[in-house]
Amino acid sequence: YLYHPIQRKQWYQRRVREHQLLLNYTNLRNRGTMYQMFHKREEGHEDSIWSVAWARSEKDNTENIVTGGVDDLVKSWNWRDEFLDYKSTLKGHQLGIVSVTINTAGTVAASSSLDSTIRLWDLDSSKQIKSIDAGPVDCWSVAFSPDGQYIGSGSHSGKINLFGIESGKLEQSLDTRGKFIMSIAYSPDGHYIACGGIDGIVCIFDLATGKLLHTLEGHAMPIRSLIFSPDSQLLTTCSDDTSIKIYDVQHANLIGTLSGHGSFVLCVDFCPDNTHFATSSSDRKVKVWDAGMRRCVHTFSEHKDQVWGVAYNDNGSKLVSVSDDKDIIIYDCPI
């Protein structure tokens, strides 16, 4: 009875939202302290989704989620009323998005692409702030410094490049004397920056002096992701060798090696509770781990293809994952 295509589309979108709200209400009633899938957004991108970030804006308390896909697009979403609302598509990159991140204030996003550029986006206005030429070859993982003054990126030359947010220029390079850097992370206290290489080596630098403090050779294959704990005391790394390792940052001691994934471990994110962390893998699984007990406490098996990214919200009660199946899934996590 809806003859016009726009009417049909609007009716369909309303029905989908009503169904999801009913599902979310049912999940809320059954929450308790259970891990469970809470919300699914199918076909979030037109192609594989490779990266995701989640942060609450200090400006207006909005929960911003940013995703990056092989479709060359960065998309901005709002998590409100237990529902994932599409906000805008941030266009400008010419090739697939490798990494997205959001600053500590939750107001600015950064994206890196195979087109060798880093782009900064105002999440309130959905406008591009700046485009940074990261060099002659594609940059990979990007991360904001805790004070929001710099954006760090790995490079094929084995250097960590630090670009000024205001200047858009390369301000400093930290040389690992290694190979292609695939992952990068700042410690929340701003004292350290760590990177993981294609050769399986982790390097930790002192940001105040620029000196290389530790070289960790625990992995046998590329390190896709690493993350510091919220208290900056631990560093968790994950690799194509299917293992996850936890290090004591100050002394560079290996605290534990965790196994459980059946294939490459692609991403890791630490929970704000400083106790748990989550990983995603090519085995299509998302796992939640207890860092102290060094064991897996839950496994999600909702995706239909390899899961490239995971990210916690600001209090650790929710977890989001993205995948080659183009879906964005949000899970309930007990806190």
Image: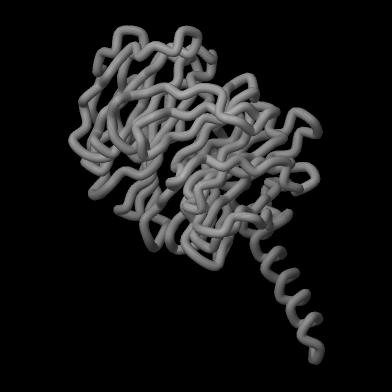
Query: For the N terminus, which image quadrant?
Result: bottom right
Quadrant of the rendered image containing residue 118: top right
User: Height in image: 191 above or below 222?
Assistant: above
Whether 123 is drawn above or below 203: the answer is below
Front residue of 155/252: it is 155
User: Which residue is depicted at the point 24% across and 36% down?
Assistant: 199
The residue shown at (39%, 63%) is 304
Q: Number of labelled discs?
A: 0
Q: Position of residue 146 (x, y in %)?
A: 59, 21
Q: Is residue 288 visible?
A: no
Depth check: give the residue in front, 254 or 220: 220
Quarter occupied by residue 201: top left
Residue 272 % position (x, y): 53, 25
* Quadrant in which residue 323 is drawn: bottom left
Colour scheme shown: one colour
Q: Residue at x 81, y 81 (%)?
A: 7
Q: Residue furthest left?
A: 220
Which residue is outermost to the front? Answer: 136
Q: Is residue 227 visible?
A: yes
Could you say where residue 132 lies in the image, as x and y percent from the top left? 60, 40
Left/right of residue 211 with respect to residue 332 in the rendered view: left
Give the vertical position of 45 relative to 221 (above or below): below
Q: Nearer the viewer, residue 61 or 110?
A: 110
Relative horizontal placement of residue 84, taking residue 59 as reference (left or right): left
In the image: residue 308, left or right of residue 26: left
Residue 34 horizontal/vertical position (percent): 48, 40
Residue at 55% over, 52% down: 68
